[in-house]
Image (cartoon, rainbow, N blue to C red):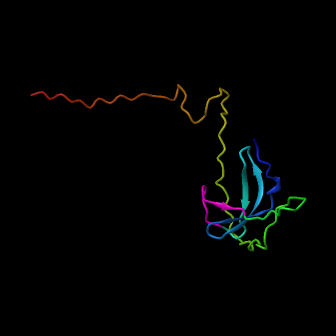
Amino acid sequence: KETNMTQFVGLLIETDRGDVGSIQSSFGTSGKFRVNFPGGTEIREGDSLYLRFKRYANDPKKAIHQDGTALPPARTGSRVDPPAKKKKNKAKNGNGKNSNAPSSSQVSVVKNNNSSSKSA
């Protein structure tokens, strides 16, 4: 069963170290989501995140309420971009093979015989 993450988008998330971020969007079918930490963070994949909220028993809307925790100001220059993907070179010689791989006419075998016979 897929989790409906729309009710959690915009809510604040905390880390063990006290860093605060907000849920930006969800992706995939297993409940994965993107979190933005404007003040930066040093957490890694697998670290714990905490969603602290209150839901009141007699609230007819059953809304999620969070206390006055606010996002920290954004740090300039703290964005870490993922490494750029390398583009694959397409073959231009028309035979559908990789142009960097040697063709049958380019391959040569060199045999080196280092055996020497001594005659007395």
Looking at this view, name the residue that lies furthest to the left: 120
- 95 or 53, nearer to the observer: 53
Total number of numbered labels? Answer: 0
Horizontal side, residue 113 vs residue 61: left or right: left
- 108 or 26, nearer to the observer: 26
To which quarter of the image does residue 98 belong?
Answer: top right
Q: Tell me which residue sits at (77%, 72%) in the image.
A: 70
- 5 or 67, nearer to the observer: 67
Q: Is residue 45 magenta?
A: yes
Q: Quadrant of the C terminus?
A: top left
Q: Quadrant of the N terminus?
A: top right
To which quarter of the image does residue 13 belong?
Answer: bottom right
In the rendered view, would you say 93 is above or below 2?
Answer: above
Place of residue 49 in the rendered image (x, y in percent of width and height, measured from the top left) = 66, 61
Horizontal side, residue 12 vs residue 43: left or right: right
Q: Tell me which residue sits at (35%, 28%) in the image.
A: 111
Place of residue 115 in the rendered image (x, y in percent of width and height, measured from the top left) = 23, 29
Q: Tell me which residue sits at (74%, 43%) in the image.
A: 29
Place of residue 57 in the rendered image (x, y in percent of width and height, measured from the top left) = 83, 62
To which quarter of the image does residue 37 belong?
Answer: bottom right
Magenta stretch, residue numbers: 41-51
Looking at this view, name the residue that lies furthest to the front: 58
Place of residue 94 in the rendered image (x, y in percent of width and height, measured from the top left) = 68, 28
| Dominant secondary-structure state across the stretch colored magenta | loop
In the rendered view, would you say 25 is above or below 15?
Answer: above
Q: Tell me which residue sits at (76%, 59%) in the image.
A: 23
